[in-house]
Amino acid sequence: MTVTPTPPPPSGSYTSPQGSYTVPPGAPPAPPQKSGGCWKALAIGCSVILVLGFAAMIALFVFVFSVIKRSDVYREAFSRATSDPRVVEALGTPIEKGWWVMGSVHLDNNTGSANIDFPISGPKGSAHVHAVASYDGNTWTYSSLVVRPQAGGEIDVLHPAASSAQTRVFLPKLE
């Protein structure tokens, strides 16, 4: 039986297979050890939580806006504002609803109140509608319904301007 001797170790230091080995000079360096995965997992986890929280807030805002926009008080305020000839003259047609709705609508049994502000726009410009109303169980009664065009001024939709025929005053002729 012939035994072949083991080849000599490469240059550098070598210890038995159970020991250590030193990289010879001129060899590429060993890759650095990776840092712990805890920080990476923590950063990813926090990012996911932030994104989900932000998405939940957006969903809440969209839900609240859609609830107000589906309310009777909003739809009636929009209808009244856009059918007023002074608003049509100021904004042109067609008049479209804006997306952002601010304010509140409260209903409790057969009573309620609303205080809302929303944008509208037409080809000639844009405006904000402000409506304040109360609910008696059957109908919304508006105490204020004002359209404020961006060009300036204020249009009180609840109190239409008197027509020129109604504002004429006939005075007797003095001789």
Image (cartoon, grey):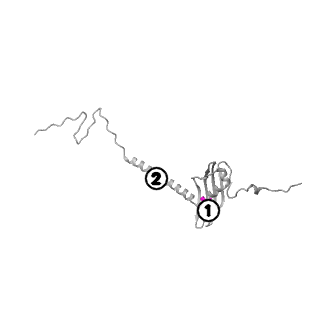
Q: Quadrant of the C terminus?
A: bottom right
Q: Position of residue 65 (x, y in %)?
A: 55, 56
Would residue 79 be counted in the magenta stretch? no
Residue picked out by circle 1: 113
In x, y percent, where is residue 173?
86, 55
**Mark 1 / mark 2, whichever is N-terminal:** 2
* Furthest residue in direction right, as rendered: 175
Q: Quadrant of residue 113?
A: bottom right
**Which residue is painted at 44% across and 49% down in the image?**
47
Look at label 2 and name its amino acid: Leu
Q: Which mark is residue 52?
A: 2
Q: In screen coordinates, is 33 left or right of 167?
A: left
Q: Amino acid at mark 1?
A: Ser
Q: Which residues are magenta?
A: 72-76
Q: How many marks?
A: 2
Percent across and percent down for residue 63 are 52, 57
As for residue 74 lying within the magenta part, the answer is yes
Label 1 Cα neighbours within 10 Å, binned few <14 / some 14-19 / many ≥20: some
* Residue 62 in the figure: left or right of residue 22: right
